[in-house]
Amino acid sequence: MKHANKIKIPIPQQFGFTAQLSIAHKLLRVIEPIHEGKSNHLSTVAIFLDIAKAFAFDKDWIQGLIHKLIAYHFPPYIIRIICSYLKDRYFTVSVKDTDSSHRKLNAGVPQGAILAPCIFVLFMNDIPQQRDIALSLYADDTAILAQGKPLSKRSPIFKITL
């Protein structure tokens, strides 16, 4: 984690999986600009995204992860540890006293695993950012906000009432 913190992973807009930050911080980052915009007679447009399969890494995603780890200059031993963590995993199904044969897992991150949040934050760290567009993330929940003058006082495109 020292290397990740040194290279600013996670980005400041990521409130999930980050020490001393919570969903309340993300909500404040969303609500405050809306409230300030309303006070300044600005329209606010918001897009809310939820990445449904955030931890369903298939082998293509694993290759993408390896590429990102290399691009972020992670030490080779860390890359090897993460690769061994994600590859060549198997499962067995038990029903009463009977076990199935071992089956290979081709995708996913072990549930409840300590590295899962770190891997996800790494994937989300290079989300595009634009000036004048606010971005707020809590794990895989993403809010994107933009403000501007209303097109017409009679017909706003969106209206948010607080």
Image (cartoon, helix red, strand yellow):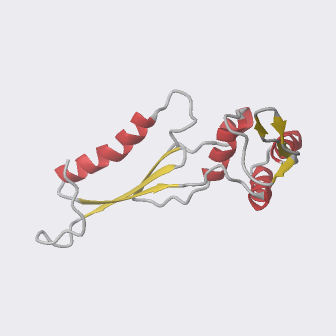
Left or right, residue 139 beside residue 110: left
Q: Residue at x 56, y 29 (%)?
A: 19
Q: Quadrant of the N terminus?
A: top right
Left or right, residue 84 beside residue 149: right
Q: Residue farthest to the front?
A: 97
Percent from the top left, x then y, of residue 82?
81, 42
Residue 152 placement: quadrant: bottom left
Percent from the top left, x then y, of residue 5?
66, 36
Percent from the top left, x then y, of residue 54?
61, 51
Left or right, residue 151 beside residue 26: left
Q: Residue at x 24, y 47 (%)?
A: 36
Q: Considering only vertical position in the picture, is 78 above or below 50?
A: above
Q: Considering only vertical position in the picture, is 113 above or below 70?
A: above
Q: Nearer the viewer, residue 63 or 113?
A: 113
Q: Is residue 79 visible?
A: no
Q: Residue at x 51, y 27 (%)?
A: 20
Q: Residue at x 24, y 64 (%)?
A: 158
Left or right, residue 161 beside residue 81: left
